[in-house]
Image: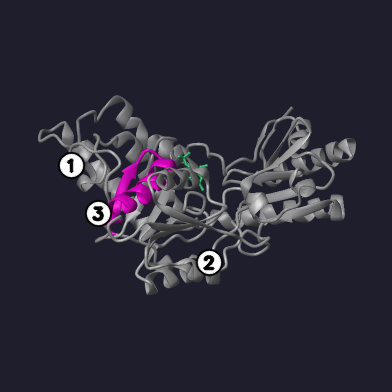
Amino acid sequence: MRRIYLDYNASTPIDPAVAATMELFLTDHYGNPSSGHWAAAPARAVLENARRQIAALLGCEDDEVVFTSGGSEANNLALKGVYFARREIGDHIITTQIEHPAIIEPCRFLERLGARITYLPVDRFGRVDPIDLSLAITPRTILISIMHANNEVGTIQPIEECVRIAHERSVLFHTDAAQSVGKIPTNVNDLGVDLLSIVGHKLYAPKGVGALFVRRGVALEPLIHGASHDSGRRAGTESALLAAGLGEACNLACDLAPMKKVRALRDHFWRELQNAFGNRVVLNGHPEYRLPNTLNVSFIGQVGADVLQLLDGVAASTGSACHAGQITLSPVLHAMGVEPETGLGAVRFSLGRATTRDEIDTVIARLRRVVSEAA
Ligand SMILES: Cc1ncc(COP(=O)(O)O)c(C=O)c1O
């Protein structure tokens, strides 16, 4: 059975250009970037180059980039870092019900320390209403964290409008851009955000590396205390190997042209599903404000996990689980008000730069077979 990968929102393969850039650091360039001798120079140079490449993608200054071990750490650093730096000013944070666990769980942790967290609802397309945000802000609000685009359904949030509301009330704004970087524009000045998280392995770089954009002047308590790496914002000898990979991946991601092809394939996929299944298939997520690579659909009357199993060889994700006859919807679909019977049949297909028309047509043909089989 031919294997087809349609789970790019979970992780991407490493781009060959990224791998080539990293290769030298496996065998050579082993110096500590902070040392004062010849062995440090190549490592230091590549770190600074990577910082420049990340900054170029985000439209920020080099010194506004902090390397992290990935998206979870970047999000934890944003939330806890701001909370610990500003808790004399206030103790209230606003986020949404559809964030990734890398936001929800640090928020729950901060609640245990005494923070007050508001989890904003979303509409049936997964979008936050800026009016709800405006009403939730109090004089004690220190931070708002709203994801740029959702990992499950791809819905894109009205970040610019939310940032305007936050700044009118002097509240800092963070966005988790793990899923949006490299797929849609993510210039921090166009968005207006104060903090923004990116993740290497969603972007054709390796796992274990990411970055947090921290606007100049934003005070942040580090999560990891130690020597003064990354301007005192994250201690630990930097990995030139991983930084080089992330930098090159960001360099490639500046060109959004490949996303045109991805969007066209994704739209072809959706049209063909509608032709095949009519009203037995529904779209989850916003029809327009949605990542160009993401297609989350529910096969009515089916169980997403069963469909995936029958689709033998196709890597994709489900949005719900069924244990002992009990349906557990993902918190995202639940917050969107998706009926359990519909949510149970949800499957997320996420396409990438390497996805071909032939792969999509093969998956459609297999779906035609297995979905009618299981009905
Ligand atoms: C929206 C979002 N934020 C954060 C993360 C966490 O990234 P990592 O697993 O690299 O820590 C992910 C990964 O799935 C994600 O999709």
> Which residue is found at the position 40% from the left and 52% from the top?
115
Q: Which residue is mark 2?
A: 158
Residue at the (30%, 51%) spot, across then down? 65
User: Looking at the image, can residue 239 be seen?
Assistant: yes
Image position, residue 276 (x, y; %): 85, 50
Residue furthest bottom in the image: 168
Q: Which residue is mark 3?
A: 63
Q: Report the front residue among 208 and 225.
A: 225
In this rendered view, identify the residue nearer to me: 313 or 76: 76
At label 2, the amino acid type is Pro
Q: Which numbered disc, 3 or 1, marks the residue closer to the eye?
A: 1
Quarter of the image containing the N terminus?
top right
For residue 193, side relative to residue 329 (left or right): left
Amino acid carrying mark 1 in the image: Ser
Q: Which residue is mark 1?
A: 228
Is residue 75 located in the magenta-colored stretch of the structure? yes
> Looking at the image, is mark 3 or mark 1 earlier in the sequence?
3
| Residue 270 numbered mark, or none | none
Q: The disc labelled 3 sits on which kind of residue? A: Asp
Q: Are marks 2 and 3 in contact (CB under 8 Å)?
A: no
Q: Main secondary structure of the magenta part?
A: helix
Query: Marks 2 and 3: which is nearer the front?
Result: 2
Indicate whether residue 291 is drawn in magenta.
no
Residue 79: horizontal and vertical position, in percent? Answer: 38, 50
Q: CA distance from mark 3 to mark 1?
A: 14 Å
Instruction: Using the image, determine if residue 336 lies above or below residue 3.
Output: below
Q: Is residue 296 above or below residue 18?
A: below
Considering the numbered disc 3 on the image, is that residue within a helix, a strand or a loop? helix
Which range is magenta?
61-86
